Image: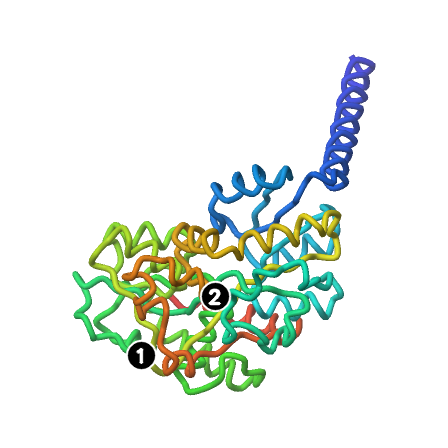
């Protein structure tokens, strides 16, 4: 019996080894195939029809993988297990990846359609010459409310969320920087503060919001708000757009005291195996017709001014998603605060999630 068990164990070990080898060879062959373009993107953040169109036009085969946070993407690229050719980090992560020498410099001569990106979206502090990044989408952090439960105009600032009449009515996005940033702005502080005293004051302010919080969630927020199961949600503009398309009682507000202005960007990681294809894809996505199609599919605001003109009038004139310059002046772009301070934000937010409600 013992010999039989040992034989079975040996077979299982051999099978595991063969699977591991085949998996490694498969990954290796994908990365080295010059006809493959490996894209690492947020979930549901690119129109699949455009991938098919690109493949048909160029002959490249797109291998598409997704992540659910900047940090998860950063960790995987730093580990270097997969030779990603293109990924799409947010602005503060571009800074972090540059500091870690994880980005390949762009050849802007290979991206002639860069001319369609509005000047106000270029030369940002996280990449002043756009040597490493090209704007993909942009948006804001704000408040979605349902007019069945909240009187229109009743919510104009972050501080309005602390009203006792919203007990167990608010859904909060599960994001440390955004939740802590909301609390910081409500106190008149910068969303990029590095002061531990101000951060603890923001956590205290956030704790006092606890009785009004129904849940701290991510993707599920859309379902709850669309189905009228919550009155208010703190989330991003693109998520709000998708909800409003499905429920006419939902509205989106960017608090007048200020909020986050974020940018997601095309970058080419150092893991790149097919830089030529990556540059072709960036240029393809900047073609106005393609950018407009993608913006309608995803629901976020495009920095492509030529594409904006191709969008339906009700979309491009909607100040909830394409704010005026006066509104934009009050918005703050997240900066990379370094690992120690980022961890402090995360820890304080985690404490809030565990104990405040």
Q: How many C-alpha atoms fall within 10 Å of the one at disc 1: few (<14), some, or many (≥20)?
A: some
In the picture, residue 283 is in which quadrant? bottom right
Choose top left, top right, bottom left or bottom right for residue 143.
Answer: bottom left
Q: Image check: 140 left or right of 280?
A: left
In the picture shown, does residue 46 fall above or below 167?
Answer: above
Asked if residue 73 shows in the view, the reply is yes
Residue in the foreground of this view, choosing between 40 and 206: 40
At horizontal 64% and vertical 70% (from top left) the residue drawn is 130
The percent coordinates of residue 11 (x first, y second) are: 78, 19
Q: Which mark is residue 313?
A: none
Say which residue label 2 marks: 303
Find residue 63 and report its horizontal and vertical position in percent. 62, 40
Q: Which of the marked residues, 2 or 1, is nearer the chain's N terminus? A: 1
| Residue that numbered label 1 is attached to | 157
Say left or right for 165 vs 317. left
Q: Is residue 256 above or below residue 29?
A: below
Could you tell me residue 232's position as x and y percent? 28, 64
Q: Secondary structure at mark 1?
A: loop
Please name which of the two marks, 2 or 1, marks the residue nearer to the observer: 2
- In depth, the one of 220 and 169 nearer the eye is 220
Q: Is residue 189 above or below residue 20?
A: below
Q: Is residue 161 left or right of residue 95?
A: left
Q: Secondary structure at mark 2?
A: loop
Vertical position of residue 72 compared to residue 202: above or below? above
The front one of 166 and 326 is 326
């Amino acid at each position: 019996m013992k010999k039989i068990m040992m034989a079975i164990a040996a077979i299982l070990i051999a099978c595991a080894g063969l699977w591991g080898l085949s998996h490694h060879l498969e990954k290796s062959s994908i990365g080295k195939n010059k006809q493959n373009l490996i894209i690492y993107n947020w979930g549901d953040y690119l129109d699949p029809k455009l991938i098919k169109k690109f493949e048909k036009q160029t002959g490249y085969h797109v291998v598409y993988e997704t992540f659910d946070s900047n940090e998860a993407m950063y960790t995987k690229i730093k580990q270097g297990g997969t030779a990603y050719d293109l990924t799409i980090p947010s602005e503060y992560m571009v800074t972090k990846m540059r500091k870690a020498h994880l980005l390949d410099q762009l050849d802007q001569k290979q991206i002639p359609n860069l001319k369609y990106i509005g000047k106000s979206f270029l030369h940002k502090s996280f990449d002043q010459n756009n040597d490493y990044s090209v704007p993909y989408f942009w948006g804001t952090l704000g408040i979605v409310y349902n007019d069945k439960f909240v009187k229109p105009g009743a919510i104009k600032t972050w501080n309005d969320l602390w009203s006792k009449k919203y007990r167990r009515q608010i859904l909060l996005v599960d994001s440390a920087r955004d939740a802590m940033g909301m609390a910081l702005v409500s106190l008149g502080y910068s969303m990029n503060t590095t002061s531990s005293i101000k951060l603890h004051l923001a956590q205290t302010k956030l704790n006092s919001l606890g009785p009004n919080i129904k849940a701290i969630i991510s993707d599920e927020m859309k379902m709850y708000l669309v189905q009228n199961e919550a009155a208010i949600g703190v989330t991003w503009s693109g998520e709000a757009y998708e909800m409003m398309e499905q429920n006419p009682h939902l509205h989106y507000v960017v608090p007048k005291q200020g909020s986050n202005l974020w940018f997601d960007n095309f970058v080419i990681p150092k893991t790149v195996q097919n830089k030529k294809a990556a540059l072709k894809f960036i240029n393809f996505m900047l073609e106005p017709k393609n950018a407009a199609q993608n913006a309608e599919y995803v629901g976020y605001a495009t920095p492509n001014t030529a594409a904006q003109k191709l969008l339906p009038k009700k979309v491009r004139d909607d100040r909830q998603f394409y704010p005026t310059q006066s509104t934009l002046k009050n918005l703050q772009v997240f900066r990379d605060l370094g690992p120690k301070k980022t961890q402090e934000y995360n820890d304080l937010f985690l404490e809030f999630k565990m104990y405040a409600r």
